[in-house]
Amino acid sequence: IDSTLLEDETIALITSLHNLLETCRFQHFWGELSAKPDLIRGINGFENSIRKFICHVIQITYQTIEKSTLRLLLGGLADNQLNQWM
């Protein structure tokens, strides 16, 4: 990416979010994303796609995981939503 583009606030945020996902800092990712909801407004299925990625990482990393930990890693889901991912 051209260095001038990296200075754009939106591009910098997207790059930061990417880095958080790639380094498995999932809770921080959800916190940053929730601070900028307009970033993904209109992108159907974005959050579920991210959750699929996170579930894949969890599956290859953990043998067991606490439900409360999974809830946080998937973005603080309500029980009925969390059960769909278990």
Image (spheres, helix red, strand yellow):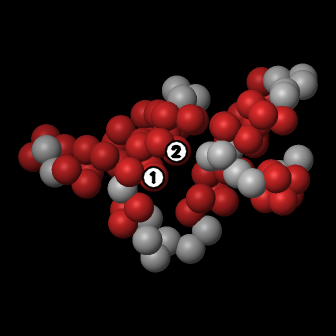
Residue at point 70%, 51% (across, down): 77
User: Given the image, on which type of amino acid does mark 2 rest?
Assistant: Trp
User: Residue 66: percent from the left, percent from the top?
Assistant: 84, 28
- Asked whether the residues under the numbered discs 2 and 1 touch, taking CB atoms below 8 Å apart as contact, a structural biologist would say yes
Amino acid identity at mark 1: Ser
Q: Which of the pair 56/79 is nearer the observer?
A: 79
Taking 20 as reference, is 2 left or right?
left
Query: Alpha-carbon neighbours of circle 1 within 10 Å: few (<14), some, or many (≥20)?
Result: few
Q: Residue at x 49, y 71 (%)?
A: 43
Which of the numbered marks, if any, corresponds to residue 56?
A: none
Q: For residue 85, say whether it is visible.
A: yes
Residue 72 location, quadrant: top right
Q: Nearer the viewer, residue 60 or 64?
A: 64
* Number of other residues with Cα within 10 Å of mark 2, as a class: few under 14, some 14 to 19, many 20 or more: many
In which quadrant of the rendered view does residue 17 lie?
top left
Q: Assign the N terminus to one quadrant of the image.
A: top left
Above or below, 3 relative to 5? above
Residue 34 vs residue 85, the one in the foreground = 34
Q: Is residue 1 left or right of residue 31?
A: left
Q: Residue furthest left?
A: 4
Residue linked to disc 2: 30
Q: Is residue 19 left or right of residue 56?
A: left
Q: How far across and down, in percent of the image, does residue 62 sit? A: 82, 24
Residue 36 location (% of width, % of height): 36, 56
Q: Which mark is residue 34?
A: 1
Q: Is residue 17 left or right of residue 62?
A: left
**Distance between the alpha carbons at the discs numbered 2 and 1:** 6 Å
Q: Is residue 22 visible?
A: no
Which residue is painted at 64% across and 57% down in the image?
49
Look at 75% across and 54% down and name the residue there: 78
Which secondary structure lies at badge 1?
A: helix
Q: Secondary structure at mark 2?
A: helix
